[in-house]
Amino acid sequence: MVSRYDRQKCRVVHLPVNACLAPICAMHGLAVTTVEGIGSTKSRLHPVQERIAKAHGSQCGFCTPGIVMSMYTLLRNSPKPSFKELEVAFQGNLCRCTGYRPILEGYKTFTEEWEVIQNGNRLMQANGGACGMGDKCCKLQNVPKAESSSNEEKLFEKSEFTPYHPSQEPIFPSELKLVDTFDSEYVVFPGKNVTWYRPTTLKSLLQLKNKFPEAKIVVGNTEVGIEMKFKQMVYPVIIQPTVIPEMTRIVKTEKGVDIGASAALIEVEHFLREVIRIEPEHKTRIYQGMVDMLNWFAGKQIRSVGALGSNVMTGSPISDMIPTLMACKVVLELQSIDSGNIVQHRLNRTCFFPPRNHNQLYTALFHRF
């Protein structure tokens, strides 16, 4: 789990990420929590760890750390999640052994719906059942005693679980919250084969791209990370644009919505849901289509760090979002330091990928009502 302080919204944001795709350089100024950090058998298990164990949700154990951290991150963002939020949280987690049933059954105990169901069952039992006739209810006359709910075999005993309360969680580091030093500093990490740059302004980003035309722009590292890990690709210069305001902005205007090229998919989804809530339905149908498609876009770990701009510029023929963006008739904005001009290009089926120079950067995406 990666945590950061959102200075615009004045709140701490917790994100689930894939550890194998998260470069250590990209963690500068962020708080990182691993499965070892939330609890241990040597000290005390966290309720998330305890419940997956007591609900028999771990067999080979290979997927368990990732599932534990997905659930932990969900609880840090929403202490009483819904069933739907629970299912979405595990979109990026694979389990070949359990079939997910014991995992979900154990973790449902954290949800508000589960508490409502349990309270309802207790009330029914106290009143002798849903029917006023109690055990003499006509629907129970032909049911064998062994099949009654009172004798039903339980997967686990909820009373054995350690209670969970969000107040017991570690506090976000004050040095990352009180000052913006780590957010505003221009960072360079030189290495033997790769140099990592993290500029803080659009001008410095364009200057870097002009100086290193072949440099890779990395936001979530979901494409470049795989190429370097499995294809043995080497990129001498990598540029991270995730702290540049113009690249991460998501703004609603009178004409439509402007989305920075480095805005995370999860932030885009949250923003579009809010636009859908406040705008007339005829203006937001295409946004509803984008939100629906984002639900099937990879998993939450990828959507938390991956950007819409990266998905466009990668040009993958199996992209989930590009057909939707084409249907939206979105306009891309490209800039370079030498021309000083902003070039706009509309995505369509006849010209899918915008013609550009190596020193040009895709900086934003626009959609008009």
Image (cartoon, helix red, strand yellow):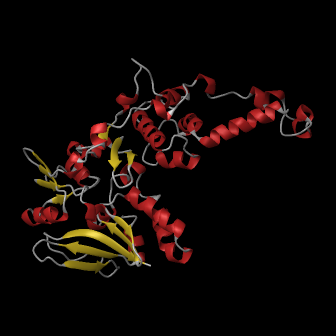
Quadrant of the snapshot with the C terminus: bottom left
Horizontal arrangement in the rendering, residue 3 relative to residue 286 (left or right): left
| Rendering quarter of residue 27 | top left
**Which residue is painted at 29% across and 53% down in the image?**
222
Residue 133 point in image, percent of width and height: 92, 36
Q: Residue furthest front?
A: 178
Nearer to me, 233 or 299: 299
Height in image: 137 above or below 89? above
**Which residue is painted at 58% across and 38% down in the image?**
108
Residue 10 seen from this side = yes
Horizontal arrangement in the rendering, residue 212 relative to residue 296 (left or right): left
Residue 248 point in image, percent of width and height: 30, 61
How many numbered marks appear?
0
Nearer to me, 297 or 163: 163
Height in image: 332 above or below 85? below
Nearer to me, 182 or 115: 182
Horizontal arrangement in the rendering, residue 173 relative to residue 89 (left or right): left
| Rendering quarter of residue 364 | bottom left
| Rendering quarter of residue 209 | bottom left
Q: Residue furthest top?
A: 42
Residue 203 point in image, percent of width and height: 15, 65
Residue 213 seen from this side = no
**Which residue is painted at 23% across and 45% down in the image?**
23
Quadrant of the snapshot with the N terminus: top left
Height in image: 347 above or below 210? below
Residue 122 point in image, percent of width and height: 75, 32
